[in-house]
Image (spheres, rainbow, N blue to C red):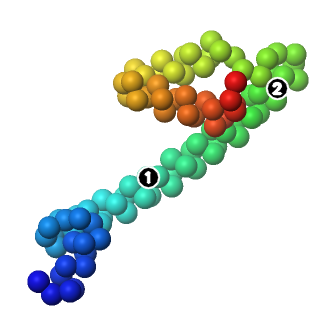
């Protein structure tokens, strides 16, 4: 193999140029999905801030534990045990540590 044919495979860990191309394309899609996910998380954080502000202004508590349990269950039901960890991370990002 020449340097031109080994370079894409070294970058991707693939053993063929064809596999390297497929992996590169899939990684681009993952990068685009990650950008969208990050944007959605940031949007969720902003909406959560509005909810917390209004709840506190009305005399309520910053955190609604029963609502958080619903969210945890939703993620667990959809994604299994790792979904619970993901939901906990989202909740912490959106409301801070409790």
Picture coordinates of residue 50 (x, y %)?
A: 76, 33
Q: How many marks?
A: 2
> Is disc 1 surrounded by few (<14), some (14 to 19) or many (20+) residues within 10 Å?
few
The circle on residue 54 is 2
Q: Is residue 21 visible?
A: no
Q: Quadrant of residue 45?
A: top right
**What is the x, y in percent for residue 75?**
46, 25
Instruction: Out of 47 and 5, give the one closest to the viewer.
Output: 5
Residue 2 lies, with reference to residue 95, above or below; the image says below
Q: Secondary structure at mark 1?
A: helix
From the viewer's side, name the closer residue of 75 and 1: 1
Q: Is residue 80 left or right of residue 52?
A: left
- Secondary structure at badge 2 equals helix
Cβ atoms at labels 1 and 2 below 8 Å apart: no
Residue 5 position within the rendered picture, expressed as x and y whole percent measured from the top left: 18, 81
The reply to whether residue 36 is visible in this rendering is yes
In the image, taking residue 34 as reference, residue 42 lies left or right, namely right
Q: Earlier in the sequence, mark 1 or mark 2?
A: 1
Q: Image point 55% across, 28% down: which residue?
A: 88
Q: Kindly give the residue lying farthest to the left in the view shown.
A: 1
Height in image: 8 above or below 40? Answer: below
Q: 10 Å neighbourhood of mark 2: few (<14), some, or many (≥20)? A: some
Measured along the vertical axis of the image, is residue 83 above or below residue 69?
below
Q: Residue 61 lies in what quarter of the image?
A: top right
x 23%, y 65%: residue: 13
Among the 4 quarters of the image, the one containing residue 98: top right
- How far apart in space, not on screen, are marks 1 and 2 (Cα)? 32 Å
Please report the residue visible at 34 percent of the width from the left and 60 percent of the height from the top: 27
Q: Can you tell which mark lies on residue 18?
A: none
Which residue matches tag 1?
Answer: 33
Q: Position of residue 42 (x, y in %)?
A: 63, 45
At x 77%, y 22%, the residue is 62
């Amino acid at each position: 193999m020449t340097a031109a044919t080994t370079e894409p495979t070294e970058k991707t860990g693939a053993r063929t140029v064809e596999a390297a191309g497929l992996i590169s394309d899939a990684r681009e899609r993952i990068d685009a999905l990650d950008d969208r996910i990050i944007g959605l998380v940031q949007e969720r954080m902003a909406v959560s801030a509005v909810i917390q502000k209004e709840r506190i202004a009305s005399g309520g508590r910053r955190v609604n534990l029963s609502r958080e349990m619903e969210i945890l269950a939703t993620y667990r039901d959809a994604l299994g045990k790792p979904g619970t960890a993901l939901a906990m991370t989202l909740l912490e990002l959106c409301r801070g540590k409790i």
